[in-house]
Amino acid sequence: MPKYLVRFTSKEYYPNFEDLSKYKIKLGTFHHYRKIEDGVRQDKEEGQRGLDLVIKKPCKKLLDGIERDEIIFGPYDESLLNENGEFKAETHILVHEHLYEFNSWMFCCSIIEDLSLIPKLEEYFECDSHYFISDLDGFVKATQNALADSLKKNRFDKDGKPFILHGTEPNVWIDGFKNYVKYGIRDGYQNETVNTLTEFMNSQKSRAINMDIWFHKPKRFEFESEFRIVLYATAGREENKVFNINDDSRLVECDLTDCISIEPKTFEK
């Protein structure tokens, strides 16, 4: 069956199809949808899931955490370790707000096979118009470039804090990841055994867990049939470092010529 990517929007943000070279689209963030005052769209655990890490050895990041909150981690001393420097008893860290409330930009649309669902989805989203994304790769590239340009022009928020929390890294890239959203029960914890907390946070495994969580939502959102584009800050395509952001949402000006359509057009993922 052919599939269609449909973006639902208000008339205020409906594209001018006579000139798509400077169309402004809104990029939300995980934080934005956690706190948005909208009963339809709000997901207080957007991009998150409880994470149960079994830590084999102590490290600075873990010890800093112990100093912050001894109730969770318990007291620490050398007698807790064996001759290999590993904890004698299993040491668990329950990360309720997965990887310290990781935040990134996102763009959401719906993927459907039955065009007769469009009026129902417009009503659901309280929108009065829609358009089709026909060139998905072109759309992602245009959005990615527009976000990068926006951040080059304005790196800091109104309080002087950087939008991308990249520490001393000299270079920051904007990368993208797109996929269907999976719906189901999102309770309990995802379990991982790691050598040290620092090693895990810097690993490819940490990044993979993030990406898996980015595309899960509770069952109650299933009618949305969401297809999601996540744009995140990274040290480079071959790097494992993914940086947190402090942005809430932003408008970016994109050239979407030949990427979107008034008329129904299928797409290739």
Image: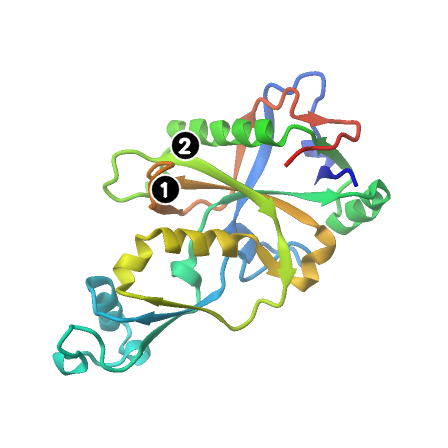
Tag 1 residue: 164
Q: Which label is found at residue 151?
A: 2
Location of residue 14 with respect to 179 vertically, above or below? above
Left or right position of 61 against 152: left
Which of the 4 image quarters holds residue 267?
top right
Residue at 30%, 52% (x, y): give it.
202
Left or right position of 154 against 137: left
Which quadrant: the N terminus?
top right
Seen from the viewer's position, the closer of residues 43 and 154 is: 43
Q: Earlier in the sequence, mark 1 or mark 2?
A: 2
Say how the picture is coloured: rainbow
Q: CA distance from mark 1 to mark 2?
A: 9 Å
Location of residue 51 with respect to 137 vertically, above or below? below
Seen from the viewer's position, the closer of residues 159 and 100 is: 100
Residue at 49%, 31% (x, y): give it.
144
Which of the 4 image quarters holds residue 220?
bottom right
Q: Position of residue 2 (x, y in %)?
A: 77, 38
Under mark 2, the amino acid is Leu
Under mark 1, the amino acid is Ile
Q: Position of residue 57 (x, y in %)?
A: 22, 70
Residue at 54%, 57% (x, y): give it.
46
Q: Is residue 9 visible?
A: no
Q: Position of residue 133 (x, y in %)?
A: 68, 32
Q: Quick one: SS at disc 1?
A: strand
Seen from the viewer's position, the closer of residues 172 and 207 is: 207
Q: Is residue 213 visible?
A: yes
Residues marked 1 and 2 touching at CB (< 8 Å)? yes
